[in-house]
């Protein structure tokens, strides 16, 4: 595939992912956010890895380093992402109360 088409597909995929995530965060139920939210994190990781593959074709060491980093950060992001039971806001990190509605969060 020609490089300019590959880059175009990459940016189109990234834009679709960003827009889908925005719609997902606004419209999805709390249950749906919990079930399918990690899919967005994984898709973001795949696109980050694709960035390296497109930018540096044939740099296998970069693929290994970035691939391991993406797997680690994806896992950490999924592990530390929570959805508030009260308002449905997606939260990152550990906190005792939701910053949007003030509800106590499960730990
Ligand atoms: Zn809340």
Image (cartoon, grey):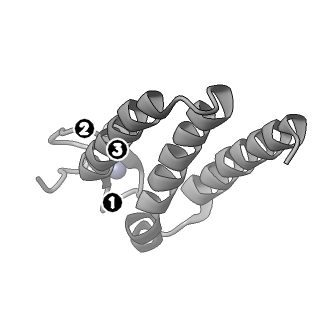
Q: Is residue 53 above or below residue 37?
A: above
Question: Mark 2 near mark 3, Cβ–Cβ under 8 Å?
Answer: yes
Classify mark 2: residues with Cα within 10 Å, few (<14), some (14-19) or many (20+): few
For disc 3, the marked residue is 91
Q: Which of 1 and 50 is in front in this view?
A: 1
Give the number of the mark in front: 1 or 3: 3
Left/right placement of residue 76 relative to residue 37 reads left
Residue shown at the point (48%, 61%) measured from the top left: 39
> Tag 1's secondary structure?
loop
> Tag 2's secondary structure?
loop
Indicate the position of residue 13 as horizontal and vertical percent values.
73, 49
For disc 1, the marked residue is 86
Q: Is residue 54 above or below residue 21?
A: above
Q: Under 8 Å from ligand 1: the CB of mark 2?
A: no
Q: Marks 1 and 3, Cα distance to the nearest angstrom?
A: 12 Å
Indicate the position of residue 45 as horizontal and vertical percent values.
48, 45
Q: Say the numbered circle drawn on residue 49.
A: none
Q: Under 8 Å from ligand 1: the CB of mark 3?
A: yes
Q: Under 8 Å from ligand 1: the CB of mark 1?
A: yes
Q: Which of 28 and 61 is in front in this view?
A: 61
Whether residue 88 is visible to the viewer of this picture, yes or no, is: yes
Indicate the position of residue 36 as horizontal and vertical percent values.
46, 67
Q: Say the numbered circle drawn on residue 93.
A: 2
């Amino acid at each position: 595939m020609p490089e300019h088409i590959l880059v175009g597909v990459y940016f189109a995929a990234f834009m679709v992912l960003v827009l889908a995530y925005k719609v997902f965060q606004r419209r999805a139920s709390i249950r749906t956010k919990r079930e399918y939210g990690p899919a967005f994190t994984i898709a973001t990781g795949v696109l980050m890895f694709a960035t390296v593959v497109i930018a540096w074709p044939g740099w296998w060491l970069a693929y290994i380093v970035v691939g391991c980093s993406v797997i680690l950060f994806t896992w950490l992001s999924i592990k530390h992402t929570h959805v508030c039971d009260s308002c449905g806001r997606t939260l990152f990190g550990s906190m005792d109360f939701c910053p949007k509605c003030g509800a106590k969060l499960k730990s």
